[in-house]
Structures are given as C-alpha cells and as structure tokens.
Amino acid sequence: MDLAVLRQAKIYFSDRYFNEGHPTNAYHQLRVHDDFQQRVKAALLEKDADACAVLLGLLLVANRLRNNFLHGEKAAYAFANQLKNFRHANTVLMYATPLWGEQ
C-alpha cells in the first residue's frame, strides 16, 4: 500500500480544516459528531499518528463530506469548491477498498 496517498490527503485536509492547530470555519461546517472529534483531530494534526489512525480519521472526513454533500445545505454554497475535497476523499476510499477484500 502506498502511504503517500494518505499523507497527501492528510496534508490537504489538515490545511483545510485547521490553522495553527485551531479548527477553521470549514471544519465546523464539516459537522463531525462529538464522538469522533478527537479521532479526526488526531489523524489530521498529530505528526506521529500511525497509518491506521490517519486512515480512520480520513474516512470519517470522507463520510462527513458525503453526508453534507447529499443532505447538507447545498443551496448555501451551491457545491462551490468541492472538487478538491472529493478528489482527496475518493483517493482515500480507493486506498481503503482493498483492505476489505475488494479488488
């Protein structure tokens, strides 16, 4: 498995959702459930987070992007600036799929 995929997605999402360790407005709009806040923050902010923790955090981000895209307040932003989000989220999903036996 190419861990560079996870590193690139981690860099992209950590830059998008955190500024000097503090959540951005984009992070708040992601609406991560309280039960998963620490996992997402650890995955995106901890330099020494292991690949499993990073993958889990990135999958949680991808889930929130998907949920917000299909059920969120689409009219408020009209899908603006979502292409990079979904490119990185899809890359994470493609990385993770073989882990469940899909080829």
Image (cartoon, rainbow, N blue to C red):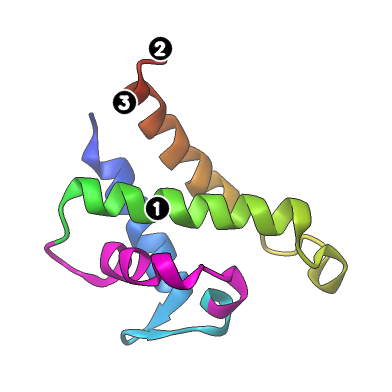
The reply to whether discs 3 and 1 touch (Cβ–Cβ < 8 Å) is no
**What is the spatial separation of the Cα atoms under label 3 and label 2, in whole angstroms?**
9 Å
Image coordinates of residue 63 in percent, x first then y, are 54, 50
| Residue 22 visible, this angle | yes
Q: Quadrant of residue 28?
A: bottom right
In magenta stretch: residue 44:
yes
Q: Which image quarter: residue 100? A: top left
Residue 58, position as x, y percentages in the image: 39, 53
Front position in the image: 71 or 94:
71
> In the rendered structure, which amino acid carries the disc numbered 1?
Leu
As shown in the figure, which amino acid type bears the numbered disc 2?
A: Gln
Per the rendered image, the range of residues in magenta is 28-48
Q: Is residue 83 visible?
A: no
The N terminus lies in quadrant: top left
| Residue 19, position as x, y percentages in the image | 39, 84
Mark 1 Cα-neighbour bin, 10 Å: few <14, some 14–19, many ≥20: many
Q: Give percent across and percent down for residue 41.
A: 33, 71
What's the distance in space between the residues labelled 1 and 2, CA to CA?
A: 21 Å
Residue under the image location 31 percent in, 84 percent down: 21
Q: Which residue is mark 1?
A: 58
Residue at the disc numbered 3: 99
User: Which three-letter amino acid code belongs to the residue tagged 3?
Assistant: Leu
* Mark number displayed over residue 103: 2
